[in-house]
Image (spheres, helix red, strand yellow):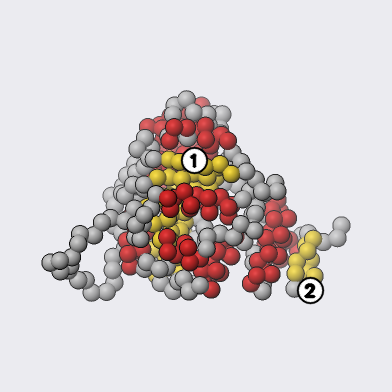
Amino acid sequence: MSRPSPTGPPSPTGPSSSPGPSSRPRTTPRAVVVTAVHSRHTHLRRQRTALALSDQSPVAHVVVAMEDPQISAQLAVDQPTSNSPVSDSTASDSAASDSAARADAGLSTQVLEIPRSSGRLPLAAARNLGAARALEQLSGPDDLLIFLDVDCIPDPGLISAYIEASRLRPEDLLCGPVAYLPELPGEVLDAATADQLTEWAAPHPARPAPAPGEILTHGEHALFWSLSFAVRRIVWERIGGFDEAYTGYGAEDTDFSWRARARGVELTWVGGACAYHQHHPVSRPPVEHLTDILRNGAIFADRWGHWPMEGWLQEFERLGLVRRDGEDWVLSES
């Protein structure tokens, strides 16, 4: 994966002003990227290779392994090495891992481990743990927490675009557009440039996709997603992080955005902070997550007065798996 020509970060829309003679030079804000992961080792490798090609390097990449000890082995001593184990047993992926070890040699990495919670992956707690470690390294008020799902390959301009947007909208919850890659051979994806990823990936049809340099303010909180977002410390603390009552699949990110809205935090979409979602098999509806969806949905409904993920629940109802019980959803009687 090689670096394309930079697209440039968002620029202010209002009139510009020059600093006065007594103005202090503005220091460049810093960023730490946080990724929670379980399995998906190949996806993580590609994400890290891309992060190493960023126009502005992060202070660190904090990787939170959710009951996945192989991550610590793979990223031992801050970087992968040519002898590190990988999740896939194929020779081609092993060779790609060796290449990635060289590509991300300058990427400072910290790995944290967290166990399952009652058998479920603790996504909310993992993100909070990663954020706490990141904030230990971010002392400036302008510094930025950036969250990326492990499936996402960041564009080289993602970090700089988020940082520039945070200068313009320092108290907002910032979201970057995520476009979806088709299924591609691994060797093709490993060799792709960001320009090629942009060409191949399709924007999400239901979410904003601002152009590089464009910022869309006053976004709908219902459209927030945790695939790629960024906040300053003051915003993270105002929202309160993720609610760790949510475990397993679903609702923790919707709850996060609802609390942001309740606490007066605007949602802003940031052009240029692009990420490319790597293809992986999914089930529609996600029947394997049915129990988690019912559990987390009930927690959300108790707090916010309505159920999230209604589309999935209606699909489950059509399959005879769930039914309405007053305002709630419950498992159908067998």
Tag 1–tag 2 contact (CB < 8 Å): no
Q: Position of residue 223 (x, y in %)?
A: 52, 67
Task: Identify the disc placed on residue 326.
Answer: 2
Q: Residue at x 45, y 71 (%)?
A: 266
Residue 295 image offset from top left, x and y in percent? 71, 59
Taking the spot 75% from the left edge, 73% from the top edge, the residue there is 327
Measured Cα–Cα span from mark 1 to mark 2: 45 Å
| Badge 1 or badge 2: first in the primary sequence | 1
**Residue 206 can be seen in this image:** no
Q: Is residue 314 above or below residue 66?
A: below
**At x 19% / y 71%, what residue is drawn?**
17
Quadrant of the image for the N terminus?
Answer: top left
Q: Secondary structure at mark 2?
A: loop
- Determine whether 227 is above or below 92 in the image: below
In the image, 263 versus 68, the foreground residue is 263
Residue type at tag 1: Val
Sort mark 1 into few (<14), some (14-19) or many (20+) by Cα contacts within 10 Å: many
Q: Position of residue 117 (x, y in %)?
A: 66, 48
